[in-house]
Image: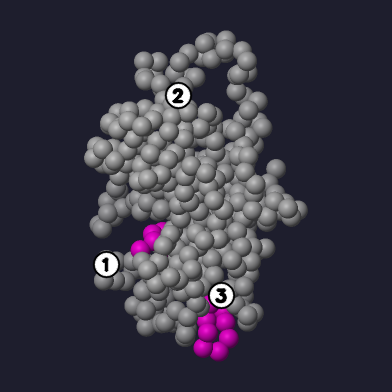
Amino acid sequence: MARKNSPIRPPTSDSSRRRPATGPRGASVGSRPRRLAEPPLAALADLQADLPDADDPTPLLTLGADAATGEPADAPAGERLQKFLAEQGVGSRRDMEARIAAGQVSVNGETAILGLRVRPGDVVRIGGRGYKVPAVGRLPRVLIYHKPEGEISTHEDAKGRPTVFERLPRIRGGKWVAIGRLDVNSCGLMILTSSGDLANRLMHPRFEVEREYAVRTLGELDSLRAGQLLAGVELDDGPAKFDSLLDAGGEGSNHWYRVVIREGRKREVRRLFEAVGLMVSRLMRVRFGPVELPNHLKRGALHELSDEEVAKLLHWADLPIEGIVKATVKRPGATRKPRAVLTHLPKAPVTKPAGASQSATTARTARGATTERPRAPRKVRSR
């Protein structure tokens, strides 16, 4: 059963999920068949109930090697080295293959070669760091962080500015990967994970995962400029547009909008508004894919998703659940009474150009986004 105040939105409809990527002329690029909406993934306890008893090998023998390992019976045992390193957040699989070929990776003290598979207990070293292959598969860890202005989204900064990674708990045998950066002057939702595959699925342009922002501008859009932002404008690095645009009101010269975009180019939201003559005075990300910034999460605070929530996020991203063992780490804020973090969130209509399909997004005011009380959202229509 879903719980209240969740940052994760289970699959509801095709319009709220990824769309196949398109080329500059609209041609499909690497598209996959779209799945029908499905109910949330079963709880981990239910998944465990469906697995054969570990003390009785008969079910595995009956199912055969393919079912027991997920690979052909004649496939070598273990996990591909580049896949294991990508899961630790070291880099993409392609990058790891290049570093393996260059002799920069060792396994149990010996230089690794392409095609090598690692097994539980193996120690992999790359770039001066060691990673031990766990005895049992585990779900990746996922953090939700409410980034304040003034922090940067990289691990290090030559200017000595504070980074979001300084606030994160240590992770054994891996590192945190940021899913979508925010510039130093922006705030709001950041997702961080120990899984390189999950980060890639959420960030890669071909999956077109929605990002939703609360934007405060100096001045107000008229219908002509609103139509341009929805139809598309030319930036210095190519055409760009908002997938949806909602007027959220404001007072005086400050005006708020809710926008949805499906890519993450540098300062893209700010540059889109600047292209039609409006300056952005505040930018706050309130949603990334199915994950929303919880109202209760204060600036500078973080929340770690439960194993059930991580499983549902992996399911949404079409990633396999390679382990059902719950993490034995202390969760941030574990001394406080735990909050429910999963629920079905209501959908609100969004404005699209005439004839365009609508996207299922939620228009809501994130807590702390503004001190003034916005008027009821009104649609912004193009002429």
Nearest the camera: 126 or 149?
126
**At 43% from the left edge and 70% from the top edge, which residue is drawn?**
160
Residue placed under numbered mark 1 in the picture? 237
Is 229 situated left or right of 367 in this image? left
- Magenta range: 245-265
Asked if the stretch drawn in magenta spans residue 274, the answer is no
**At 36% from the left edge and 15% from the top edge, which residue is drawn?**
74
Q: State if disc 1 and disc 2 touch (CB < 8 Å).
A: no
Q: CA distance from mark 3 to mark 1?
A: 29 Å
Q: Earlier in the sequence, mark 2 or mark 1?
A: 2
Residue placed under numbered mark 2 in the picture? 70
Kindly identify the amino acid type of the residue bearing the numbered disc 2. Answer: Gly
Estimate the x, y position of residue 335 in percent, counting from the top left. 73, 53
Dot 2 alpha-carbon crowd within 10 angstroms: few under 14, some 14 to 19, many 20 or more = few
Q: Main secondary structure of the magenta part?
A: strand
Question: Between tags 2 and 3, which lies in front?
Answer: 2
Residue placed under numbered mark 3 in the picture? 248
Q: Earlier in the sequence, mark 2 or mark 3?
A: 2
Estimate the x, y position of residue 355 in percent, counting from the top left. 41, 62
Asked if the stretch drawn in magenta spans residue 250, the answer is yes
Estimate the x, y position of residue 124 in percent, counting from the top left. 40, 36
Residue 352, visible in the rendered structure = no
Nearest the camera: 122 or 136?
122
Kindly identify the amino acid type of the residue bearing the numbered disc 3. Answer: Ala
Q: Earlier in the sequence, mark 3 or mark 1?
A: 1
Q: Quadrant of residue 7?
A: bottom right
